[in-house]
């Protein structure tokens, strides 16, 4: 049986998704931030005959995320998604889960993107350079934006750093960096932090400063602080070479994260 979840279901829903805090970072974060009564967010639970949750579907605006650790009603989940007739839907999740839903969708996605998804629950000690790693504050946001602007692979979606400021003020993002004189040359940051997990993003180093271990140093300090707070870390990557660096630090692949887009 699939039904809408309400505030009365908060405890059972969070207990279910908290069993895999890295895999469910977005679901946990959106529940903590917005709950069950916002117009732009819905949650549904798929219950077995004994009344136990076997899957959860989250809608945040036009984005759907499905989580199921085992057997679940993939056809019923697909029917819920099909009720949304917007042309720009996105269905996301661990690929092995999403792949069970997509065949049942009446409207098929016309683009699918897949990246590696990794998590870290314990940090591996590695040798890092003897360099000062600093923690950024709101006043450092213009320098973070300027660093990201110089990284070819980074999309320029926040040219004024408004979302970085909002996330810092909300306590769901932090950044560690290395500077040369007054210019940031390497950084690592988080987003979507919740009480159990955090997403690592923005790992970068300027040309001319690479191969010095700066990104590893930023990541080490960032990971140590978050793990000391009892949070699991997770990240996406699509470059196997970058994956090797993360694995040296203690990240292990969960699987692949897929985004099926309807355009």
Image (cartoon, rainbow, N blue to C red):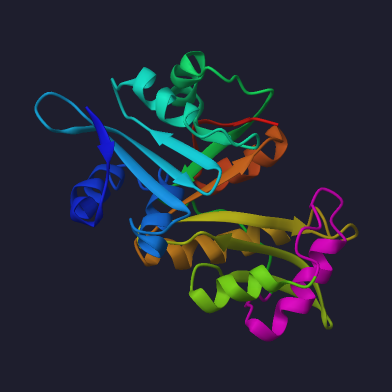
Seen at 87% across and 51% down, the residue is 152
Seen at 60% across and 59% down, the residue is 219
Q: How many marks?
A: 0
Q: Is residue 141 left or right of residue 185?
A: left
Point out residue 156 in the picture as x, y percentages from the top left corner.
81, 58
Seen at 65% across and 34% down, the residue is 87
- Can residue 104 be spotted in the picture? yes
Seen at 64% across and 78% down, the residue is 136
Q: Residue furthest right?
A: 208
Residue 152 part of the magenta-drawn span = yes
Q: The N terminus lies in which quarter of the figure?
A: top left
Point out residue 56 in the picture as x, y percentages from the top left corner.
33, 37
Residue 30 part of the magenta-drawn span = no
Point out residue 138 in the picture as x, y percentages from the top left corner.
64, 83
The foreground one among 168 and 104 is 104
Q: The C terminus lies in which quarter of the figure?
A: top right
Point out residue 247 in the picture as x, y percentages from the top left corner.
56, 41
Magenta-tinted stretch = 132-159
Q: Is residue 21 left or right of residue 167?
A: left
The foreground one among 63 and 147 is 63
- Can residue 213 be spotted in the picture? no
Give above or below for 138 relative to 83.
below
Q: Residue furthest top?
A: 103
């Amino acid at each position: 049986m699939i039904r809408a979840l309400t505030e009365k279901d908060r405890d059972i829903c969070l207990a279910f998704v908290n069993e895999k805090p890295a895999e469910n970072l977005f679901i946990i974060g959106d529940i903590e931030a917005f709950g069950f009564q916002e117009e732009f967010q819905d949650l549904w639970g798929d219950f077995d005959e004994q009344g136990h949750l076997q899957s959860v579907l989250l809608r945040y605006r036009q984005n759907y995320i499905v989580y199921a650790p085992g057997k679940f009603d993939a056809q019923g989940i697909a029917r819920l998604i099909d009720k949304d007739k917007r042309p720009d839907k996105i269905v996301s999740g661990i690929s092995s889960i999403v792949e069970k839903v997509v065949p049942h969708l009446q409207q098929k996605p016309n683009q699918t993107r897949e990246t590696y998804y990794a998590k870290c629950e314990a940090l591996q000690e590695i040798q890092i350079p003897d360099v000062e790693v600093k923690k950024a504050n709101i006043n450092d946001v213009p320098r973070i934006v300027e660093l990201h602007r110089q990284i070819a692979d980074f999309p320029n979606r926040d040219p004024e750093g408004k979302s970085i400021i909002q996330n810092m003020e909300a306590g769901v993002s932090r950044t560690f960096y290395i500077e040369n004189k007054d210019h940031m040359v390497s950084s690592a940051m988080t987003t979507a932090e919740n009480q159990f997990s955090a997403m690592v993003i923005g790992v970068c180093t300027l040309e001319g400063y690479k191969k010095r271990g700066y990104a590893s140093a930023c990541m080490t300090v960032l990971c140590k602080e978050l793990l000391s707070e009892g949070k699991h870390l997770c990240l996406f990557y699509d470059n196997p070479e970058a994956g090797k660096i993360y694995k040296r630090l203690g990240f292990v692949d969960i699987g692949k994260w897929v985004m099926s887009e309807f355009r």
